[in-house]
Amino acid sequence: MKDPAEKLKRINILVVDDMESMIGLVTSCLRSIGAEKINTAYNGASAWSALNKKSYDLIICDWDMPKMTGFGLLKLVRESETHKHIPFLLLTAAREKNLVVDALEAGVSDYLAKPFQPKELAFRVIKLLRKIPV
């Protein structure tokens, strides 16, 4: 499937962030490039619960959240036979290189530093579409 907008219409995306405004920004950006099936969670624990109730094709997740961090969720996802294949885009305000290295070592698919431009997010999502069989 060559058209990213067509693929985006078909996939299920989970957006995880503890800030409603960031969820709104990410969701708006995703919709602007053709995504239709978007669910949200406000921390890693609720995201893990959502992942075990429904099948997702892409996870876009904040790093720093209460109850369970994005890094904690990433580790659970990568350790799970059911979910380990899901592309995982980590959003982070963290500038410390060791945190990014930790995420890369844990298997993050890509990361994006906050604040970001919507076009940056769109580019990263479209790039990750290649890893999603539909």
Image: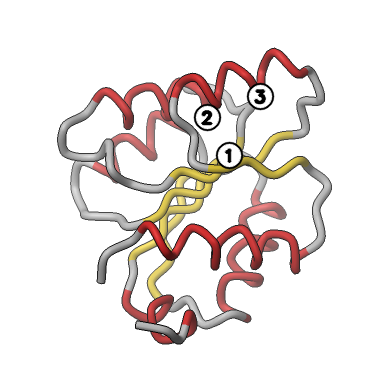
Look at the picture and state if 3 lies above or below 100. below
The amino acid type found where label 3 is placed reads Val
Q: CA distance from mark 1 to mark 3?
A: 9 Å
Mark 1 or mark 2: which comes first in sequence?
2
| Residue tagged 1 | 90
| Residue tagged 2 | 70
Q: Are marks 1 and 2 in contact (CB under 8 Å)?
A: yes
* Nearest to the observer: residue 6 or residue 127: 127
Residue at coordinates 76% horizontally, 40% vertically from top-left?
A: 113
Residue at coordinates 21% horizontally, 53% vertically from top-left?
A: 54
Residue at coordinates 48% horizontally, 58% vertically from top-left?
A: 128
Q: Dot 2: within a 10 Å radius of its alpha carbon, few (fewer than 14), some, or many (20 or more) residues?
A: many
Is 19 left, or right, of 107 in this rendering? right
Q: Is residue 55 visible?
A: yes
Is 61 left, or right, of 117 in this rendering? left
User: Viewer-nearest of labels 3 and 2?
Assistant: 3
Image quarter in which the C terminus is found: bottom left
Q: Identify the secondary structure beneath mark 2.
A: helix
Mark 1 or mark 3: which comes first in sequence?
1
Is 5 left, or right, of 30 in this rendering? left
* Nearest to the observer: residue 25 or residue 5: 5
Q: Dot 3: within a 10 Å radius of its alpha carbon, few (fewer than 14), some, or many (20 or more) residues?
A: many
Look at the picture and state if 72 lies above or below 124. above
Q: Identify the secondary structure beneath mark 3.
A: helix
| Residue tagged 3 | 100
Q: Identify the secondary structure beneath mark 1.
A: strand
User: Viewer-nearest of labels 1 and 2?
Assistant: 1
Q: Dot 1: within a 10 Å radius of its alpha carbon, few (fewer than 14), some, or many (20 or more) residues?
A: many
The amino acid type found where label 1 is placed reads Leu
Q: CA distance from mark 1 to mark 2?
A: 7 Å
Mark 3 or mark 2: which comes first in sequence?
2
